[in-house]
Amino acid sequence: MIEKLILFIKKAHNLGFFLFTLFLIIGCDAEKKVFRFVGETMGTTYSITVVDRDIHSKSNRIKNEIDSVLVEINRQMSTYDHESEISKLNDLQSDNWFSVSQDFHRVLSKAKQLSQQSNGLFDITVMPLVTLWGFRYSEKDHDWQPPSQQKIDSVLSHIGSQYFELDINKFRKLKPTLQIDVNAIAKGYGVDAIANLLNSNSFANYLVEIGGEIRCSGKNQQDNLWSIGIDSPALNSMPGVSLYSIVGLSNTSMATSGDYRNYTIYKDELYSHVINPQTGYPTKSVVSSATVITPTCMMADGLATMLLVMEPEAGIRFINALEDSEGLLIVRNSDSTFSELKSEGFDSYIKN
């Protein structure tokens, strides 16, 4: 029998849900124990919950292995580390082949696939536009105003996933000025990498979260589905304060993207941080929040970003056409109320 439990509510920053996590302080040896690993990575935080009878005897080794995996991914894919693989690739003003690590190549391959599937609406070469609009950094200039059409057109000429190609662990720019940023799927890939690590150590019940992106396996300590809350996308709302829905998950992944925390307002118009790579402008879609459930977190991460750019009806049709994928789109109406569009099977996950 469990004698004492502390309930932790881990609030995810800049994303649309929070996690209910139990951490065991004292319990009988016959009970499954809960261990929680926390830390920082990729400019955000991670929280990993493992339910297992023998986790305490392995905790130090597992923690070191987790950090080692995340440090390596950050070394490969962080645009804020000037010595990372991606920074060196971006610095390369050449169409020569550039050697990349296996992990980085997997992420680049998935990004290329998502770009092709979305007809270019998902694009990792959009970084110069994000920078132009001032969304790469949390602090914005008080005198901020939209860039001129001339500047947007100039940058647009250097945007497009068709301007790079891949070979076995190699990357080549077809436009030497191309710049890439895999932030839209790197956290999801990190979640998958940690899940694979836990699987290789024979852990069957866990929840992995990096910056709000989630993958879970098995059940929680009460032998129930993992409960995940999806935030109502009210502007400036704090994570977990107002929930739109709660879903129950097991053996799957979930990611949410939204326009309600990273944005700016100019002359009463909201400018989202999500840029449409075809127009060069922040997305004009009415989708305020997109949640995707898929087997892998990297896929969920990328699809959630993509759905913010697509028109809602087209986005739901896209998700319905994919295998093992479900989606929830929350649409902000003109009167500030919300409506929703759901894929055919999303209701099966809803708990409330």
Image (cartoon, helix red, strand yellow):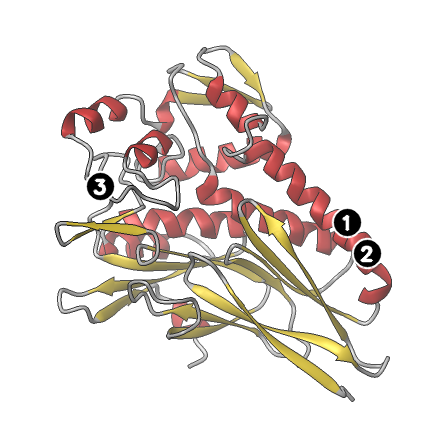
Give the residue type that dot 1 points to.
Answer: Asn
Nearest to viewer (mark 3 / mark 2): 3
Q: Residue at x 21, y 29 (%)?
A: 152
Q: Residue 143 bears which disc, if any?
A: 3
- The answer to the question of whether label 3 and label 2 lie on touching residues, with beta carbons closer than 8 A, is no
The N terminus: image quadrant: bottom right
Left/right placement of residue 307 relative to residue 252 reads: left
Q: Residues within 10 Å of mark 1 (few under 14, many from 20)?
A: few
How far from the left and from the top, in percent, is residue 343? 34, 63
Q: Residue 60 bears which disc, if any?
A: 2
How far from the left and from the top, in percent, is residue 334? 13, 64
Q: Is residue 264 above or below residue 289?
A: above
Left/right placement of residue 141 relative to residue 83 reads: left
- Tell me if I can see residue 101 in this picture: yes
Identify the secondary structure beneath mark 2: helix
- Residue situated furthest front in the rendering: 142
Which of 137/283 is in front? 137
Q: Residues within 10 Å of mark 2 (few under 14, many from 20)?
A: few
Identify the secondary structure beneath mark 1: helix
Give the residue type that dot 3 points to.
Answer: Asp
- Tell me if I can see residue 223 in this picture: no
How far from the left and from the top, in percent, is residue 175? 37, 15
- The answer to the question of whether label 1 and label 2 lie on touching residues, with beta carbons closer than 8 A, is yes
The C terminus: image quadrant: bottom left
Q: CA distance from mark 3 to mark 2?
A: 49 Å
Give the residue type that dot 2 points to.
Answer: Asn
Which of 154/216 is in front? 154
Q: Which residue is mark 1?
A: 64
